[in-house]
């Protein structure tokens, strides 16, 4: 094949694939950011089971759910303002910005 024709064919192919390649890079970046965990692999927010436990309960109501440590019981609270209630185990420390269930 003629070297000039080969170069033109390569340029045409690269030009055709460039938008797809850029879109792929952008979508992969968005997917990586969306699934990324904070530094140290720490999960933020209550586990899904804790949210489900308080789905139909009021703040301060007794609740139970199963976690990695086994069956846990506690009280429903809002981890952050305008956030769904979650079951906070009795021995869990109050998260930043949330009111503690007991005062010392």
Image (tube, grey):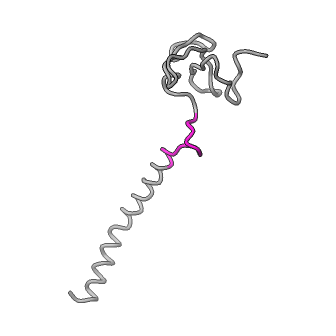
Residue shown at 67% from the left, 28% from the top: 95
Give the number of callouts: 0
Kindly indicate the quadrant of the structure image that contains residue 38: top right
Query: Residue at (57%, 39%) from the top-left corner?
Result: 42
Q: Is residue 35 left or right of residue 98?
A: left
Q: Residue furthest top?
A: 62
Span of residues in magenta:
33-44
In the figure, residue 23 lies in which quadrant? bottom left
Task: Please tell me which residue lies in front, 82 or 101.
Answer: 101
Residue 52, x across and y down, in percent? 49, 20
Q: Is residue 53 above or below residue 47?
A: above
Left or right, 79 with respect to 1, comes to: right
Seen from this angle, which residue lies furthest front? 69
Question: Where residue 53 sits: x, y (%)?
Answer: 51, 17
Q: Position of residue 7 (x, y in %)?
A: 30, 83
Depth order, front residue of 7/49:
49
Q: Residue furthest right?
A: 104
Image quarter in which the N terminus is found: bottom left
> Outermost residue, left direction?
1
Q: Say above or below: 93 vs 43.
A: above
Q: Is residue 101 magenta?
A: no
Please determine whether, in this image, residue 16 is positioned above or below residue 50.
Answer: below
Kindly identify the residue that appears in the image at 60 percent across and 20 percent down. 88
Residue 38 lies in the magenta-colored region: yes
């Amino acid at each position: 094949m003629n070297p000039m024709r080969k170069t033109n064919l390569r340029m045409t192919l690269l030009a055709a694939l460039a938008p797809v390649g850029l879109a792929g890079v952008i979508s992969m970046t968005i997917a990586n950011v969306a699934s990324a965990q904070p530094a140290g692999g720490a999960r933020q927010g209550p586990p899904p089971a804790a949210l489900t436990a308080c789905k139909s309960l009021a703040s301060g109501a007794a609740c139970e759910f199963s976690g990695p440590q086994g069956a846990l019981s506690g009280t429903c609270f809002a981890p952050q303002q305008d956030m769904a209630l979650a079951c906070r185990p009795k021995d869990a420390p109050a998260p930043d910005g949330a009111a503690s269930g007991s005062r010392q």
